[in-house]
Image (cartoon, helix red, strand yellow):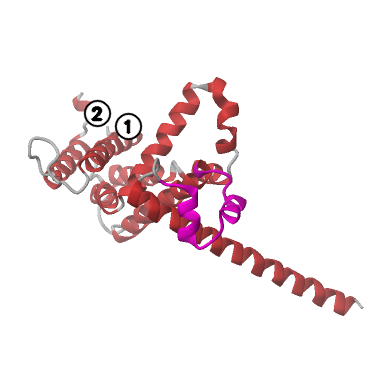
């Protein structure tokens, strides 16, 4: 009896795992469909009906996975942070034998490239930080935002949101140890400065769309190269001490 009871438990566990796996696959397919539609028409124009059709499911099924479009968008934002973090890890591994300065600049460069190749993810990351600012500024509206802040994807994003910053700081600290980055550089300050540099680029990129010369016929790739050159000089010579 114990033998059969054990086997029943194992079979039941396997069955549960299969069900969870199928649910995850369908959830991923929904997120894929949402990401595709959002990239095509934008967040405002994307409709849950259209996302359900693209995912090959009913609207009722869609709402059983995601209770609102906002909640589904959080899943897309989480995927954006996952993708960006993976890019950072890949870059760090590629430059593990290089100086900390070269690795840091490579991270910034990979961030620029990520934004160029992923308009939706770039915009999603900016939208998330705007969402956080709005929630913090309007504490009285917490109840209205509770559906979002209680979402499992919101919690997942919070666990992940600072990791790209920490990875960059780690490489700057490595550069200070190997002498390629000036010892007076404040690693967190310059990491944030690097992010604001890229965020400005993202906004220009999103505003210009396919047009690569949005302002006074300035080529965005030239702007990227100039930004990276400035970052390298600041880190090498101690930008903080020059203020």
Q: Kindly indicate the quadrant of the structure image that contains residue 42.
A: top left
Q: Is residue 128 visible?
A: yes
What residue range appears in magenta? 46-69
Residue for point 51% across, 59% down: 28
Q: Position of residue 141 (x, y in %)?
A: 55, 24
- Residue 169 visible in the picture: no
- Which residue is nearer to you in this view: 62 or 14? 62
What residue is rendered at 76% in x and 73% in y?
Answer: 10
Question: Mark 2 falls on what kind of element?
Answer: helix
Q: Which residue is mark 1?
A: 189
The structure residue drawn at horizontal position 50% and vertical position 56%, both measured from the top left corner, is: 52
Residue 98 inside the magenta-drawn segment:
no
Q: Which residue is mark 2?
A: 240
Give the main secondary structure of the magenta stretch.
Answer: helix
Image quadrant where residue 24 sits: bottom right
Q: In screen coordinates, is 128 left or right of 208?
A: right
């Amino acid at each position: 009896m114990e033998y059969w009871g054990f086997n029943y438990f194992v079979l039941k566990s396997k069955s549960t795992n299969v069900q969870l796996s199928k649910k995850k696959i369908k959830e991923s397919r929904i997120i894929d469909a949402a990401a595709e539609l959002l990239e095509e028409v934008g967040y405002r124009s994307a409709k849950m009906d259209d996302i359900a059709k693209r995912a090959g499911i009913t609207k009722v099924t869609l709402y059983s996975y995601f209770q609102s479009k906002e909640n589904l968008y959080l899943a897309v934002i989480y995927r954006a942070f996952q993708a960006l973090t993976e890019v950072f890890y890949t870059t760090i591994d590629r430059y593990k034998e290089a100086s900390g300065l070269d690795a840091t600049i490579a991270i910034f460069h990979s961030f620029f490239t990520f934004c160029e190749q992923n308009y939706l993810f770039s915009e999603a990351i900016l939208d998330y930080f705007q969402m956080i600012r709005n929630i913090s500024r309007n504490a009285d509206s917490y109840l209205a935002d509770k559906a979002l802040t209680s979402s499992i994807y919101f919690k997942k994003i919070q666990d992940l949101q600072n990791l790209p910053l920490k990875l960059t700081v780690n490489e700057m600290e490595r550069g200070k140890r190997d002498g390629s980055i000036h010892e007076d550089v404040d690693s967190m300050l310059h990491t944030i400065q690097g992010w604001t540099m890229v965020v400005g680029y993202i906004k220009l990129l999103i505003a210009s769309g396919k047009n690569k010369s949005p302002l006074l016929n300035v080529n965005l790739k030239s702007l990227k190269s100039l930004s990276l050159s400035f970052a390298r000089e600041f880190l090498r010579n101690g930008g903080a001490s020059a203020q």
